[in-house]
Image (cartoon, rainbow, N blue to C red):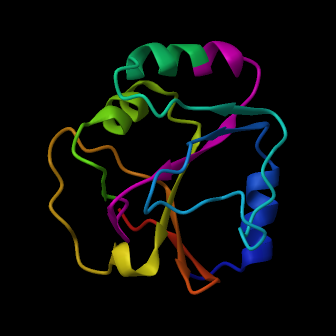
Amino acid sequence: MGISLQEFSDLTATYNGAILYQPLSGEIDYNKPLFPINLHPNQMVLPVNTNENPFAWADKCAEYFKKDIPYVLVPGSNFDIYGTRHGRGGGWYDRFLSKIPTTWLKIGITDTSRLSFQQIAKRPWDQTVDWVLACDSGVWNIYKVTP
């Protein structure tokens, strides 16, 4: 950890935009009042439909944010404190994240019960996040990824 919610909020405020997901069942809803960061008003929301091409969406986001550097909120079924994330098994986010600029801040959003302090299996195609925000009954913990 080592960083407060305020410091993390200040960090995300230095970015010029936000790429968001549409929360599915079991995923954290960042629209709730207790979410620890103020969402940037310059936003793009990724589709729920996994038939949408993730590479095309990465290009769309890069074009939209060509003069800005956004942060990306990333859902997942499991995360570890090393930045590894597992999704719902389709690989959509891994393909999307593999194509976006490395300067964009990737923030994993999860429930504490889905966060491991032990490394989870990282497959060659798995894309990592830079930070993990984990919620435990309304209390948020922030983890800077340890490579």
Inspect the magenta stretch and tell me whether residue 130 lies in it: no
Q: Looking at the image, which is closer to me, 3 or 137?
A: 137
Inspect the magenta stretch and tell me whether residue 82 lies in it: yes
Q: How many marks?
A: 0
User: Which residues make up the magenta segment?
Assistant: 61-83
Q: Residue at x 78, y 69 (%)?
A: 33
Give coordinates of residue 136: x percent, y percent. Answer: 53, 85
Compared across the picture, whether 120 is left or right of 96 comes to left
* Residue 68 versus residue 87 in the image, above or below: above
Q: Residue at x 43, y 63 (%)?
A: 26
Compared across the picture, whether 118 is left or right of 92 comes to left
Give coordinates of residue 35: x percent, y percent. Answer: 71, 68
Q: Looking at the image, which is closer to me, 109 or 15?
A: 109
Picture quarter with the N terminus: bottom right
Picture quarter with the C terminus: bottom left
Q: Looking at the image, which is closer to me, 43 or 6?
A: 43
Q: Residue at x 49, y 27 (%)?
A: 100
* Residue 104 versus residue 51 in the image, above or below: below
